[in-house]
């Protein structure tokens, strides 16, 4: 009998978690555009971070996933610890939505909901219909899993050992906390572990007095996911994971002593034990957030004490971290920001290369080479991230953006390569003491300024999705081609008239050729921007 109970329970738990993930994925896709804007409204105001954390978690149906994502944001330098504290507190509130849904006991209609959801997934002609189908399918599977878990637990009433365990937990609240912590740490989902409590309550196998300490421990257990995720991250990311632990331990320490009044309060609002567990879960997390949010600065300070050290300077990805892949819609926005950053570094590389070329400034040339190395490193890291992002279940519009970014980072890297070529030509010019004619200097400076402005505008068009600016770059690329031909002919005339050195002329021609190719890559970047307009 115990083997049958275990198999049915595990099957029900698996369906519950799977349904929760499917529903969260569908909600995330449906709310994709709104989720992209959440980061823009996330300010240093703690209350805003709280609301954003609650909303994102309600959408993706997992406080662990939200906290892991926050660790990624902090690791990427996108979010400060103070902002992270507010979002983490909000995530604990958002995760209570699942328990409230489960308490409605919609098991009887779950098969119909799944049928409607699958029909929309298979036959829906519009993207919104398929997204709704995914939400409904996950919703229905969640309740089917809940029903299977609940059914599997009915025979436990006859087991004297189980009854003794419940009595022991009722006598010792701290054992209940440890049990809740262990269950959640193992299955890596506080929503699923709360669901187990509610399944027990559905069969009258657990009282509210026994359930509450377990519930408190489950909130601590959910921190394990973020702690594991923070391994190998920077100091602040590890501190963000510790903030999650501190928040829940403080909350548990407070509530463990007021369990009696909490039972009285929750019972006052009525409902069966399932509903009371859901209400207690919500009350615990909302009250914790209200009490601790004003003291967020002290919690951040405590995290710094527990994870001491000074941050090292970072030269890799700034806006991206693999943990952000938990929410692909937001990851797309951050990928664009990272590519824009890469473009600005390539722009600065070209600036230093041109300055070194014209002024024979070797410090500028060294600076250009260092920045070009950073561009190459970013190109490698971005490529891998975009591959992972492309396989994370994007909408068609988001997939088009990612495809465009693949091409764009290649073009930006090539701009860096051509800037490096100009550095090498500059060094050859300095080493061999080559001198340009006054006319040659003037012509090269004119073309260099024109191309540099194109690079600057191409990155701006990418950053702001400025389609008018992108179209102007396309027309300016033709002007660069014309300019390169005219400068080449002018140089040949100067050679024929003995107005410049032949060896200097070779450097001149190679340099303007590199500028012309940079113009081509600017045009390619503008095309990628214009593809968004079509989408």
Image: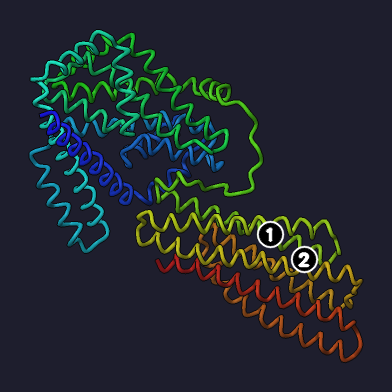
Q: Residue at x 21, y 34 (%)?
A: 101
Q: Contact (CB < 8 A) between labels 1 and 2?
A: yes
The quadrant in which residue 346 appears is bottom right
Q: Residue at x 30, y 20 (%)?
A: 179
Q: Position of residue 35 (x, y in %)?
A: 39, 46
Marks 1/2: CA–CA distance? 10 Å
The quadrant in which residue 462 appears is bottom right
In the foreground, 62 or 295: 62
> On the image, numbered disc 2 is attached to which residue?
423
As drawn, 246 above or below 136: above
In the foreground, 143 or 173: 173
Q: Dividing the image into 4 quarters, which one contains the C terminus? A: bottom left
Density class for disc 1 (Cα within 10 Å; few <14, some 14-19, many ≥20) is many
Horizontal side, residue 136 vs residue 35: left or right: left
Give the tally of numbered discs.
2
Horizontal side, residue 534 vs residue 484: left or right: left
Density class for disc 2 (Cα within 10 Å; few <14, some 14-19, many ≥20) is many
């Amino acid at each position: 009998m115990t083997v049958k109970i275990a198999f049915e329970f595990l099957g029900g738990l698996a369906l519950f978690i799977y349904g929760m993930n499917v529903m969260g994925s569908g909600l995330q896709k449906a709310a994709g555009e709104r989720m992209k804007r959440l980061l823009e409204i996330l300010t240093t105001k703690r209350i805003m971070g709280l609301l954003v954390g609650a909303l994102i978690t309600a959408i993706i149906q997992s406080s662990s996933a939200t906290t892991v994502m926050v660790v990624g944001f902090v690791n990427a330098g996108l979010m400060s610890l103070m902002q992270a504290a507010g979002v983490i507190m909000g995530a604990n509130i958002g995760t209570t939505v699942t328990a409230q849904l489960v308490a409605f006991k919609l098991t009887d209609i779950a098969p119909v909901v799944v049928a409607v959801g699958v029909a929309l997934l298979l036959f829906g002609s519009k993207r919104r219909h398929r997204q709704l189908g995914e939400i409904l399918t996950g919703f229905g599977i969640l309740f089917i899993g809940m029903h299977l878990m609940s059914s599997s637990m009915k025979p436990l009433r006859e087991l004297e050992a189980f009854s003794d365990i419940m009595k022991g937990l009722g006598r010792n609240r701290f054992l209940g906390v440890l049990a809740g912590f262990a269950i959640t740490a193992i299955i890596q989902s506080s929503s699923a572990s709360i669901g187990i409590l509610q399944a027990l309550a559905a069969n009258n196998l657990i009282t509210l007095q026994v359930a509450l300490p377990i519930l408190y421990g489950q909130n601590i257990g959910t921190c394990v996911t973020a702690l594991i995720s923070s391994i190998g991250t920077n100091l602040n990311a590890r501190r963000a994971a510790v903030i999650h632990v501190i928040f829940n331990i403080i909350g548990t320490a407070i509530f463990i002593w007021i369990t009696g009044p909490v039972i009285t309060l929750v019972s006052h609002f009525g409902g069966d034990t399932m509903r009371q567990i859901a209400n207690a879960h919500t009350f615990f997390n909302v009250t914790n957030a209200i009490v601790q949010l004003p003291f967020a600065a002290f919690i951040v300070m405590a995290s710094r004490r527990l994870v001491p050290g000074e941050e090292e300077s970072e030269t890799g990805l700034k806006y991206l971290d693999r943990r952000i892949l938990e929410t692909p819609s937001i990851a797309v926005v951050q990928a664009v920001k990272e590519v824009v950053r890469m473009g600005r570094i390539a722009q600065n590389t070209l600036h230093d290369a041109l300055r070194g070329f014209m002024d024979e400034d070797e410090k500028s040339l060294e600076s250009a080479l260092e920045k070009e190395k950073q561009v190459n490193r970013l190109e490698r890291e971005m490529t891998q991230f975009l591959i992972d992002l492309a396989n994370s279940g994007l909408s068609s519009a988001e997939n088009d953006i990612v495809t465009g970014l693949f091409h764009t980072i290649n073009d930006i890297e090539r701009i860096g390569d051509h800037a490096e070529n100009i550095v090498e030509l500059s060094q050859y010019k300095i080493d061999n003491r080559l001198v340009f004619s006054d006319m040659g200097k003037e012509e090269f400076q004119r073309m260099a300024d024109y191309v540099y402005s194109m690079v600057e505008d191409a990155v701006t068009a990418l950053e702001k999705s400025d389609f008018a600016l992108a179209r102007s770059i396309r027309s300016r690329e033709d002007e660069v081609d014309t300019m390169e031909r005219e400068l080449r002919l002018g140089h040949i005339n100067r050679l024929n008239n003995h107005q410049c050195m032949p060896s200097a002329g070779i450097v001149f021609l190679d340099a303007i050729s590199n500028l012309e190719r940079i113009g081509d890559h600017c045009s390619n970047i503008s095309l990628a921007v214009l593809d968004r307009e079509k989408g």
